[in-house]
Amino acid sequence: MKCIYCNKEKEERLFNTEHVLPRMLGTFRENLTIKGHVCKNCNSVIFSSLESRFKEDSEEGIFWQMYNLNDSYQVRIRGEFTKMFFIAGLGDDFFNDIFPFFEYKDGEHCIKFVDQIKIKNYCKDGYLILLIDNSKKIRGSSKFRKLIQNLEGTRSEDVSIFVGMQNNKDRLKLDEAISLLRELGIDYKEKQGKFTGSEGIEGKEVKISVNQNIGTYVARFLAKISFNYFSYCAIQSDMGHILFNDNFIPIKDYILGKKDLPTKEVLISIQQEPIIYDEKTVKRRAVGHTVTFYRFNGEILSQISFLGKKIYTIKLGKMPEELNKDNFGCGHFFNPFNYQFSGMSKNPNKWNNGVQEGFGLFKLY
Ligand SMILES: [Zn+2]
């Protein structure tokens, strides 16, 4: 058995299951996996750290955390390459520090406020949001003990508490949050408090602005998902051997961090225009993930996008002669809100005719 990333031959027990789209980006009715082709070292050691960088330090990763579909007790923001600013519209800058969450309800994506503790000592410019109700649920668990360790040395002045209150005399949730902090080893001293009535929250729009640079970790993560999808399609076409073609050595070495290419050589463009048919009709991005690959000027390019945000074009490598056919290419759209995915086609005759596009190297046209 040979790993498609590090090209090393290893025993079977040193391989595990690689998800084409990491589970942190949703689970689907049928989860696409590559079994026995990615070694444990590449998967668990190298890719896991890329994944957490993406989650904590990219626009898409942070938006994904705002949906909190897996009901986590915490949100982690590194603040190294991606800065996000919120204007809560509650009349006082004090409330702009609240981390807003999204909820997908009746086909709409709405903002919701969740009782939370914000702690500003994560990484250099980052912070941690503890969702109070979910953090209480993990009391006594190993996760809770680990959290205590991680929070060791946290100063009271780095901590803010935001909770829903009936009126400005109602301290119930606030006192509960303070005692939770005490259990976590933080002696919280209240400095200033502000209250806004519910009339302040109803009907207000939260403004979100993002200032993002793509760091190498995030670019490597994007390249990895593109190459995973391409690999899955190659394996489905019974052409797994192509993954060991020399043309893919540079992209694999880049993903593994063995080779430092300028980001622009891999991530060749970032754009906003819609790429799938339904989006072109309604003129807005579908909130889901898109992954494609196709041939262009003798290269294999891949376009990927998460939650309907930016479209990243990634160069996977020079086209191996064996694949150089007119119908080369494949693309899928993944909807993390209804757990479905569907194939995409550039052939207008195939649009909306109900025929499902499968996975393979030769489909798109
Ligand atoms: Zn490997």
Image: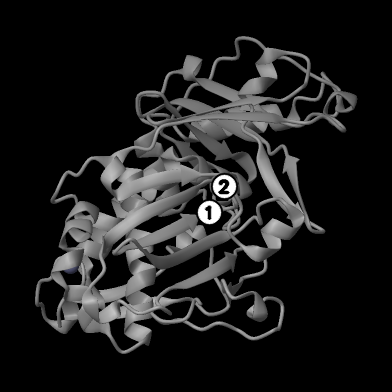
CB under 8 Å between discs 1 and 2: yes
Looking at the image, residue 192 lies above or below residue 312: above
| Residue at the extreme top of the image, as rendered | 191
**Is 25 or 357 nearer to us in this picture?**
357
Asked which quadrant contains residue 287, the reply is: bottom right
| Residue 221 appears left or right of 335 | left
**Is 155 or 297 nearer to us in this picture?**
297
The answer to whether residue 344 is seen in the rendering is no
Q: Secondary structure at mark 2?
A: loop
Where does the image place residue 103, in percent across and percent down from the top left?
71, 50
Asked which quadrant contains residue 213, the reply is: top left
Neighbour tally class for label 2: few under 14, some 14-19, many 20 plus, Cα within 10 Å: many
Q: CA distance from mark 1 to mark 2?
A: 6 Å
What residue lies at 29% left-to-right and 57% top-to-bottom?
A: 47
- Check disc 2 and report the residue beneath it: 309
| Residue at the extreme left of the image, as rendered | 9
Where does the image place residue 169, in percent across and percent down from the top left?
82, 19
Q: Which mark is drawn over residue 306? A: 1
Quadrant of ligand 1: it is bottom left
What residue lies at 60% left-to-right and 59% top-to-bottom?
A: 288
**Residue type for callout 2:** Lys
**Residue type for callout 1:** Phe
What residue lies at 64% left-to-right and 30% top-to-bottom?
A: 208
Where does the image place residue 162, in percent across and percent down from the top left?
66, 27
